[in-house]
Image (cartoon, coloured by chain):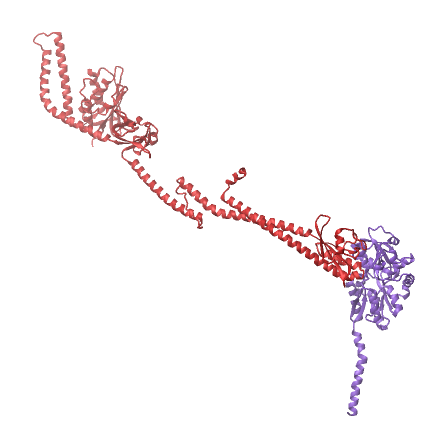
Chain colours: A purple, B red
Amino acid sequence: MGVPSILCFTSVIAFCGFLVVVLPGSVAATEPLRIAITPVLVEHYLDVNRQWVAYVGEKLGRPTELVQRRSYKEISDLLQQGQVEVAFVCGLPYVIDHAKFGEELLVAPQVYEEGPVYYSYVIVPSDSRVERFEQLRGKRYAFSDPLSNSGYLVPTYMLARMGETPSGFFKRYIFTYSHSANVEAVAVKLVDGASVDSYVYDYLAATNPALTSRTKIIHRSPPHGITPVVIRKETGRRLKEQIRKVFLGMHEDPKGREILKNMMIRRFVVVPDSLFNSIREMRRVVERQPVPLTLQPAATRK
Amino acid sequence: MTGFIKPLRRWGLGQKLSATLCILVFGVALLISFFVMGHEEQALDAELRHRGSNIVRTLARLSVEPVLQYDSWGLYKVARDIVRSENVMVYAMVLDPRGDVFSHSDPARFPIGEPLPPDPLTSAALTAEGLLIQVGRDPDGETLYHVTLPIVLDRQRLGVARIGVTRRHLEGSLARLKRDVFVISALLAALGMALGLVISRRMTRSLERLSASVRALSQGRLDEWILVETKEKDEIGLLADSFNQMAESLRERIREIQATKRYLENLLENANDFIYTLALDGTFTYVNRKFVELGYEKGEFIGRPASAFLFTSGDGRAEGSGRGAFEARLHAKEGAERVVVVTTSPLRDNEGAVVGTLGLAKDITERKELERRLLRSEKLATIGEMAGAMAHEIRNPLGSIYTAVNLLSEAPERPIREEQLVLLKTMRDETRRLNRILTDFLRLARPRSPLFQSHDVNGLVEEVLEALRHDEAARGNAVYKELDPRLGLIEVDADQVKQVLWNVVLNSLQAVGKDGNVVVGTAREDGTAKIRVRDNGRGIPGEELSRIFEPFQTTKRGGMGLGLAIVHRIVEAHGGRVAIESEEGKGTLVEIHLPIRRS
């Protein structure tokens, strides 16, 4: 083997090294952008979700993939492990995950005129005699997700302020992992009351009034930061900006406006982390309770 | 029952067949359907239990995970969806091992965490080791199957899946099935009825045609009889064939009989003899066409007694029903009555009983006339022979006697007494009378051929009447004249015609009484000169009238009966004819026809 041969061999090795170092970036650029959501929002919302996920991909010029999981816990895990880049999550998981692995806020929808906030409703069957939350003592109650702000943290916070825990206050409580399921559970009287995301309830009132008319709202919480769109801390700044730009420009684009209309969202806005301080405060109060959060309803039996 | 059956007997074959088929089909259909429905019910029941078992197994399988996770919402959805997916489902539930509701398809009535109301079925369900099917009732009283299956994981009993399956839809299906069966049975029955009508129509059409033909045959309407055609070779077809043969031969026979009848009728009707039948009471029941020649319609005879038309001279056997033969006169409406020889024989019916008389009257009028003429000819011939002798042997002495008597009475040698004068006058009168008789006799026996010359017949009548006025034989009765001035001249023998007139008018004058009258008339009629002499005298009896022109026939005393015989002979010699009509007690009419020109 002569010098030329060695040079030649070296060149080949160098080229291969180039391929190994450079190409993964290009390959990564063509991989679909995975966006996760939970049906906590609205159970039968799949088509609407597909529309905006596809819209984002279209605007970015790269494929997107919708990833759905039943609980916020599963979404949090996917974000932490880097299996999804973007997710529509509740304020409570954001607060937890931001503290845990630096998950960042991207944008948040503005549904109500007041700003990017929403409420937690307490609903009961329309013919129920219950008029106040306190009257639900000893009744059956439905939460949505244990990591839901409106569907779990707000009512447990209310109980904590009363010096109560769910297992102590309610005769029995269940998790449906879906705000729309909570509405239905109240409508069919599987439970005597439930906590519901105001955005989901209002969306259902507009699209399925037959269902919501069998329920009534007896309590509306103070405003809290609405469910934001979050992104991994590790995602490149350029991509973050590109995606944010897409969301923020939706209401100015005819197609985006159509999708927003279907979602009953006015527009997406940039929100500060401090928007979720009320959630952090409630969490702090609730966690001071002697009885920890539990996922074992059987233990709640009296 | 009989009151119900009685109207059925009047039903036609078709109605009976239809009703039978209808009842039969309906009955069989119902029988089969109830049999099938019994099995169907069992099969549907078994199927329902099978479905209930499968559903409860699915519920138990789907319940494991939600039970482990205490997911009442998930269980509710499973129970709800199962109840919604099957129409036989009434409820679905999952109980925890203690019997509290884990989740129920009707959460409002059966809240989660609450025990079920205690009842024996639930107690049994909670302790069941395997699949358990219990039979209960729903609030409407419908049978409800409670199907229970324990939810087991790794031999650990997690709870009990239980569902309620109703038979309501099964009952509904069976009710629909019953209704369908009934409707189909009714349709089949209607079909059977229609089929029965069609079949019976085919059958009865042949029978009706057969019946109509029989009726036509029995009423003798041979032309209306139709051949009963049937293609079927069944019993009705064979009957129709037999009927056709019978009818054909019957028709042949009837035609033969009719032909024979027509032949016999022809014989009877066209016979040259009077043929009739009489009933036992002597009235006509049949007369043949020959009777019409008498101037009557046939109908004028039927039902009237034979004695009104048929006169016998003797014992009146015309009405008798026995066998016999006799001569009689048959009365005619127009023309002269007929002389007939009647032969009768009894008319018998099929049993041989006498029901009347068959009579055959042979017209012998012509023969009689011929016989009479022959007789007259014979008489005249005899007279002729006698006349030859008598002319000289009697007339010459008679002339001498007459001359002698005249001489004695006119120039007597001595005066004769008055009595003797009377005797002489009697002798002269009788001699003259003898001479006249002899003259008549000779005229008849040896007639002179007429000497035809043109004469005025009216003038001849006047002459005769004038002469008669002075004749004492005329007795002074009046004679009226109705003479036709248009009569004109006629070629006759004047002496002979005057002789004829003399004889006839004298007869009439002698026949009438004191206030009788005689009319003599002349007329021109159909190329003949007609002389009519009518009187209202005593008339001539019928039996003598027929022989009135024969010599020596007389009705008056002292007459020889030669006058009218001479009249007849002279008129015949002139080529004319003489007719006489007379009715006893009313008078007589004599008509003499003389041809105006000689050919």
Q: Position of residue B304 (x, y in %)?
A: 34, 28
Q: In the rendered image, which quarter contains the N terminus of chain A? A: bottom right
Residue for point 83% across, 51% down: A128
Q: Is residue B578 left or right of residue B302?
A: left
In the foreground, A274 or B591: A274
Q: State which quadrant residue B369 falls in.
A: top left
In the foreground, A204 or B347: B347
Does residue B394 lie above or below A168 as drawn?
Answer: above
Q: Is residue B422 left or right of residue B295?
A: left
In the foreground, B293 or B453: B293
Q: Position of residue B309 (x, y in %)?
A: 30, 27
Can the viewer see residue B426 in this picture?
Answer: yes
Instruction: Give the number of callouts.
Output: 0
Q: Position of residue A158 (x, y in %)?
A: 90, 57
Can the viewer see residue A245 in this picture?
Answer: no
Q: State which quadrant residue B366 falls in.
A: top left
Does residue B326 lie above or below B56 as drawn?
Answer: above
Q: State which quadrant residue B525 falls in.
A: top left
In the foreground, A153 or A137: A137
Q: Residue furthest bottom?
A: A2
